[in-house]
Each structure stands twice: as structure tokens, then as C-alpha cells.
Image (tube, rainbow, N blue to C red):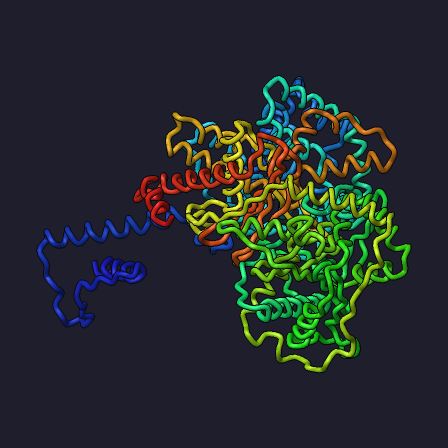
Amino acid sequence: MRALIKTERFLSICNGNSRNYGKQNNNEHTKPIKTQPEKERSLVAKLFFYVKTWVKQFQAQPTLTSPKDNAKISEVKNKQQHANLLAKIRKKSITRNQSKNQVSKATRNPASVDIRRAESLIFPGPHLTANLVSKATRNPRSADIRGAEPDIFPGPHLTANLVSKATRNPRSADMRGSESDIFPGPHSTASICAQAYALPADKPTRHLRKATPLRSIKAGQVMLPRLKDQLPNYPVIPLQLTLNRYLNSLQPLFNEKAFEMEQKLTRDFLQNKGCELQKLLQEAGQTDDNWLTERWINVTFLRHRSPLTVYSSPCMAFPKQHFRSTFEFLDFTAKAIYAMCEFNNLVESNRIPVSRLDGFELDNSQLHKVFGTVRKPQRNCDVLQQFGSKYVVVIHKNNFYKLPVYCTKQKYVYNVFQIRRHLVELINSGCPKGPAIGLLTHDTRNNWAEGREMLCRKELDAYAIRCIERALFTVSLDEYVEVPEGQERSMLAAQLLHGGGLHINSANRWMDKTLQLIVNPNGMAGFCCEHAAAEPYPAASIMDYILKNIVNPEYGKDSHTTDPAELVEHLSFAEVDECVGFWLTAAKLNIKEITRRLKLHAFQFDCYGKSFIKSHGLAPDSFVQMALQLAFYRQHKKLPVQHGSAHLRIFKNGRSEVIRSTSTESSNFVLTMVSENATPRASWLAMRTAVDAHRHQTMLAHQGRGVDRHLFGLKQMALEHGKPLPYFFNSAGYLRSKNFRIVSSHLTTPHDSFMAYGPLNSEGYGCCYNLRDNDITFAISGWDENPDISVARYCSAIESALTDMGHLGNTDSPNSTAKDVGNSMQHKK
């Protein structure tokens, strides 16, 4: 009995619950304690119960393992389950050799296209097989991201499955699990891509598995190689994966019969010309760090013959300034010039912090391409040139002035006092308004190339143009413009994009310069950026740097005070002759037409911002994309082909990729929102599914796995090698999928700023927005030549769509209702 008591006491101590039944005297001469038989039986039963429980505990867990061992056991089980799944898929693949889908047969016919080998080079490892792709493409009617990429996102928790289930049963959809559902564990494509990208292209396949060991990643983490001082090359992904995503983007745009025709054309392209062009593109990818960027710049920008104004160059608007005098106007300008020069010093000395995406370094090379850069007009194709200048060119009343900002010997920036003093002298010089030479830069590129050639025949004009083009950047000191109440943002966008017209400030520009700082005495300020040299993000970084520093009254005033040895130089132009006058007349007509046709409206939606959107587990950018699509459908009763923008800075010299925002999920969401029979809960689930599907497409685009750049590369291979262009590139599906009626971009800045640019065509809109914590600023543009296109109505539709989507925000909350959200937003208004 004593032994049992001691054992029970020992187990109680081990369990952290000490039970003291009384002290036991071990003295032999002490009489034992007498107890009643009923109590003895009760104690024995109690002890027996503890011993029995103790034994069961060890039976349930025969061996004790560490957390690491448990993880290993779990991993082995997962691998076994995955192997069983692959075995089932292979078995099904063997039993379905009679499939009518030719795309599926292509994966089993190496003579048609060697998809297996292509995937083994990019997605190595035992967990990826071509059978997965084959399975995904057996049903071409539903060939999309849900079926095309089980090999990219393996595991039981595929987002594709969630999207598919949500589409079939919106009430059971739950995609709030963010990126953990999209990147489920160590065998995701991201980590496998990292393994492939880390290797030279000419290494044999058998060495791929020995490159970089796979390791688990956090939710949402994009796995790419962590190479010291090296970014991965831009890849060439398997053609079949791209075509599957391409068909997925077409599905909501065509009826069943037309879609089957597009599938047939796509299968034919895959099996014939596409395979040949893919091989050429893979060869180009092996020889270039980035096979895309140079080709993209040449075709999209330098060979484009339309004017830079509105058609190509975006603008970046600063928050409204409040100048009470000319002194404050020039002091702000001097500080902005000083900050830009200081930022340039940081860039040249490589002191700009490296940005990161989910912990991975991004390419900063575009920051080195905006200062001293100019796009020179040439017949058929322009030229980009960059100069290491130590001066800026100030434009005031159509006159051009060369303003030194660096000490030539010591290479430091003159302080704000010195720069401001020169600006005061400049505007007080009393020079009459100069000839409207700057208008020539607004014209079509071929016209401006001809006009520039005529100007450069005169030595005085050639010298002035050479100084302007080699400047670090230009500074436009505009003439005062009255701003109607309530139109401040719209007027600011117009002034930055084109200058307001022939008789306002349009001639006070030089559109070829990559960076134009524009300041108006009425408080308007911002950048106009030439797009060929870089994406807008360097200008946004410079803007943030300026706005961060100019709030300090003493900023830039404690640096070197040595007076500049060089004086401000007036860059004069000769009198306009008949030849130059001809091209100047054409430029005047062009800028007049642009300012007449372009409609701009910028507004701020202040009911909520990204904080509210994030609080419901939704991606803010994808949320706004769905709002733009819903607004378009409500206004035009058609589903738009929608263009979103994603950067490719994960790769060397990466620029941008297209996010095809229109999808089956977004179509279901729009149709649910406009349905009179849909419940708030169903609308909420449809919205959440569409937002998560768009976020998934965004992640693919950031990883270089979008559709448009790959197809662009194939088209260029045909042109560069003198091959006939396949009919695929002239098909109805391809042309319609490229006719973007919504072209959108997202500016990320905490300031009350926004970006604006023109629409891609006369049938749609250009949409820029800045998502802040508690508001969203939009800038919408459109051409006023199509009666169906109304910028004002579309802006109203966007506000209505955002309001309705905000009402859905709490429909899944047990403590709130849509009515509560609506009341709070109405109160905020």
C-alpha cells in the first residue's frame, strides 16, 4: 500500500499537482495507521484509476520526440501523401489517352512540344510533373489558373481549389487565409524557381536538385535566390502555362462557341509556330540577363510615334502648397532643386536603401537612369541618352536659363540661399516672353524630329538645345493660373500633363527630359516624367524625399556658402524662320487638339482607405481593381478588358508586367453585385473570391509569370528572325485581350499626392489611384470623342461602387451589419 501511495504521489508531482496524503513515519516502532475498510477500498480504487490513466498515456504516445522529429515525421507523411496523389494522377493520365484536348496531347507528344523538358528546367524536383499540367488542360473550356497550375502550387490547400469551390458555392468560400493558401509549404514554385534561377542556363538538368536546398517559407513569401550582389535573370517560362492563363483571361469575354474557337487557335499555335518561337526565346534568355527590357523599351516607347504628352508621359502631383508671396514660391522651388540634387548624390554614391518585397531585394537600377537623361527625337525610332551634368535648366515665360547647382571643383550642391537668389534674379530680369519653342516637344515624334533638325542648322539654336538636353533636369516656373473651386486636383493634373494649352503654360515645357519639376505660384507643383527611361517609381521616391525635407525651415541652408563661379546663362534661340515656323504651327494645332479632347477628373474618396480594407482580410489594391471593374460595368453594361501594372524589380533591370484583372471570378463578382436577387452575404463572398483571385494574379506577375510580356517576346522572335507572324497574334481573342478599356496604376505614398496619365485608347479610361490609410485619391482620364465615354460619370460610378463594397465589409461579422457600416460612412461624409 505504501508503495502505491508513493507511486501516486510521484506521478502527481510529475503532472504538476502534488497531493499530500499525510506524512508517513518510517520508524519501525511506530504503529501503522489504521483506516476503515471502505476508505481503504476507496483509496485503492483511486490509485488504480491513476495508474490506469498513466499507462494509457504511455500507450497513446509510446515514444517521446522533439519538435524537430515531429516536423520530420510530418514531412515524411506529407511526402507519402503527395506521392500517392501523383500516382493517382499518373494513373488517370494513362487511362485518358483518348482525350480530345490537343493541348493535353501535346504534353504527351514530345514531337509537338517538349513541355516536360521545359518544366524540368524551370521547375525541377520530384514534386513537379508534366502530368499535372496535362491534367489541368484536359478540359480546355475551363483552362485557367485553377487547372493550369497545380504543379506550381502543390499541396492540399491550393488557392486554386478554394477559388473553384468559392465559384461553385459562394456561401462556403473562405479565402481570407491570405498567402498561406497560395504558397503552401516548402514545395511551392517560388522556392523551386529559386532553385532554377540560381543556376547558369547551360548546367545539365541532373544538377538542378543539388543547387539550393529547398526550405520552408512564410506565408506570402516569394521564394527567389538570395545571391550576394546578384539578382536573378528574367526567365522564359513554359509556353503552355502562359497559354493556359491567356485562355483563362479570355473566358469571361467570349460566349461558349467563340471561346471554343479561340481554344482551337491557341492549341494550334502551341503545337506549331508557338513551339518554334518559344525555342528562339529560350535561346535569347540564355544570352541576356533580361531578354525583355531592351526590346520592350524600343517597341513600346522609342518606336512609338505619338506625342509624349498625355499618350506616354505620366505626371506626379505634389500636395497643394500655400504660397503667400513670390518669395515663398521661389523658396519652395529652391528647396526642391536642392533636394533633387541631394537625392542624385545619394544615388551616385549608392546610398539609397534597397527596397524589398517579402524580404527579397529589388532592383534599384532605374534610379540611376532619370537624372541627366533625355529622349532625343529621331525618325522612326528615338534615342535615349544620359549626361553627367552639374546644372539644371529653368524655363520661365518660354525662356530657358542654364542654372549651375554644383560647384565644379568641390562637387557639392550650392545651398538654398544661392539657388533662390539666382531664381529671384531670373524672374526679375525683365525678359519678354520667348518664342514657343517648347511646343515642338509636344508634337508627334516624327514632326519634332524634323523640327529639331531645322533648329539645329543654326548654331545658336543647336547650342541651346544641346544645353537643355544635357541638363540634370528642367524646372518650369509657370505663370499664375486661376483655379475654380472644387477643381484643384483636376486642374493640377492638367497643368502637369500638358501645361493647360497653347496660351497658358504648354510652351513652358521640354517634354523630352525624363524629369521636369513644375511649380506654379498658385501652389500647384509636381513632376512630368518621360516614361522610356524608367517607370514612375523613381519620381515617386524623389517626391517623397522632397516632401520629407522641405517642411524643415532650415533645410539646405547650412551647406557651403561659396558664391557660384558660374553665372546664370540665358539660352537664346534665333528668330523663328519659315521652316521652323511650319513645324511650330503643326505643334500648336496638335497641343490645341490634345487639350481640347482630353478630359481629366481627380477626386478623393474619403469614406475609408486601406486600413478599412485590410481589417477585413482583403488586399487593398485588388479591392480597388474590382471597384473599377464594377463601376465600368454599371456605366457601360459590358465587362471591360482591364490592365493592372506590376513591377518586375525582382529581376535584373526589370520594368513592368501586365496584370489581367478581368477574370472569371471578377465577372462573377460584378454579375452578383448588379443582380437584384443576390444577398449581401453572397455579394461579400463573391467579392472576396474575386479580390483573392486578383491578388494571386498579382503575385504571378511580380514573379515574371504573367501573360503579356511572354507573348510579346514570342512576337518579337518572329519579327527579329524574319519569320511570318502567326495568325494567333491577329486572332479576335488576342486583339480583344489587348484592347484594354481600363489602364490602371497604383501610386504608393503617404502624402496627399496622386499620379495621372492619359487613356490607352478612345474606348476606355486611364485610372491612377493612391491608397492611403483613410482615403483613396483617384485621377481618371478619357478622350472626349466617344459619346459613350464620360469621365465624370465614371468617377461617380467609382464612388458608388466603393460605397456599396464598403457596405459589404461587415456582412460576415457577428457584431456588425451592412447598415451599421453605411451609417458610419454617411456620418463621415
Placement of 122 over or under 771, stated as above or below:
above
Residue at figure coordinates x 90%, y 57% from the top left: 458
The answer to whether residue 767 is visible is: no
Q: Position of residue 495 (x, y in %)?
A: 62, 52
- Name the quadrant containing residue 12: bottom left
Residue at figure coordinates x 68%, y 53% from the top left: 529
- Residue 537 is left or right of residue 671, and the answer is right
Q: How many marks?
A: 0
Is 412 or 19 nearer to us in this picture?
A: 412
Residue at figure coordinates x 77%, y 67% from the top left: 402
Is 157 or 722 nearer to us in this picture?
A: 722
- Name the quadrant containing residue 354: bottom right
Q: Position of residue 15 (x, y in %)?
A: 30, 59
Q: Tell me the quadrant of the picture where the N terminus can be found.
A: bottom left
Is 348 or 153 nearer to us in this picture?
A: 348
Most extreme residue toward the bottom is 562
Placement of 802 over or under 828, stated as above or below:
above
- Residue 596 is left or right of residue 687, and the answer is right
Residue at figure coordinates x 43%, y 39% from the top left: 805
- Residue 719 is left or right of residue 244, and the answer is right
Is 829 or 8 nearer to us in this picture?
A: 829
